[in-house]
Amino acid sequence: MRKSLISLAFGFTLLCVVSLQAQEFHGAFGFGTLVAPGATANSSGTFPSLSGGLYPSFSGIFLLKHHIGFGGEVAWRARQAVYGFSNGSAFFAQPYRPIIYDFNAVYGRTFQKKVGADVMAGIGGEDLRFYTPYYSCGSFSGCTNYVSSNHFAFHLGADIRYYFWGHAFIRPEAHYYVIHNNFEFNKVNASRFAVSIGYSFMPGF
């Protein structure tokens, strides 16, 4: 958890610095879902699927000169799911919630004031929060009722912006996460599909 907060804080600071020189800023809030392979099994046991659930998300993109810039986003499962694992002799079940975040290099364009598009690639992580019936307290983290399992991830994404009213846009988007050592889900990767509504701050638009 602490590593996730440090990463998010660093990313936010970087984005704020970049924004001082930004030619465009696109901020958005959306909803989507996660798609991953179904439940799988190997010699270690039977693993659940990471698919499903409603994922709200926040994102921001800063574009500098030549339509190149930086961006970041975070998405989380709105409701907890039940993680179930079986190894043939025992069954384990616990509430959990995935949180996925990423920081990217972005190339974006706006065409004829109505349509825009962005492609992005970067790094991020998956924070799996497994909830417990009790609270544990730390010196810096405060008191929480979950433990986190964090995994590094590579991210690829693309979207299309349609400006339906002035600078306001609706944006269908697709994201793919290559999750390192995602052993809770048999090391599978995941895709996220979402629709966001946002606003663009851009001179001369």
Image: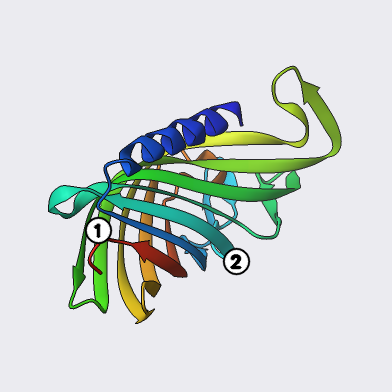
Q: Residue furthest top?
A: 139
Quadrant occupied by the C terminus: bottom left
x and y percentages locating residue 98 in the rendered image: 59, 49
Q: Is residue 182 left or right of residue 145?
A: left
What kind of element bears circle 2?
loop
Query: Which residue carries the number 2 mark?
Result: 54
Real-space Cα separation, disc 2 to disc 1, in angstroms: 23 Å
Residue at the outermost front position: 204
Question: Left or right of 190: which side holds 69?
Answer: left
Task: Name the residue: 51% across, 66% down.
Answer: 30
Q: Quadrant of residue 115?
A: bottom left
- Left or right? Give the position of 41 relative to 118: right
What x and y, as percent, mark residue 46?
A: 59, 50
Q: Amino acid at mark 2?
A: Leu
Q: Residue furthest right?
A: 134
Q: For the residues carrying marks 2 and 1, which lies nearer the camera in this image?
A: 1
Name the secondary structure under disc 1: strand
Task: Identify residue for label 1.
Answer: 119
* Residue 119 in view here: yes
Residue 184 numbered tag: none
Residue 125 picture location, percent across and down? 46, 40
Up the image or down, 142 lies above or below 17; here it is: above
Q: What crowding class fits label 1: few (fewer than 14 Cα within 10 Å), some (14-19), or many (20 or more)? A: some
Q: Callout 2: 10 Å neighbours few (<14), some, many (20+)?
A: some
Residue at 49% of width from left, 36% of height from top? 8
Residue closer to the observer: 87 or 61: 61
- Towards the viewer: 25 or 40: 25
Q: Amino acid at mark 1?
A: Val
Residue 194 in view: no
Give me the residue at 65% from left, 50% from top: 97
Return the disc, 2 or 1, that comes first in the chain's sequence: 2
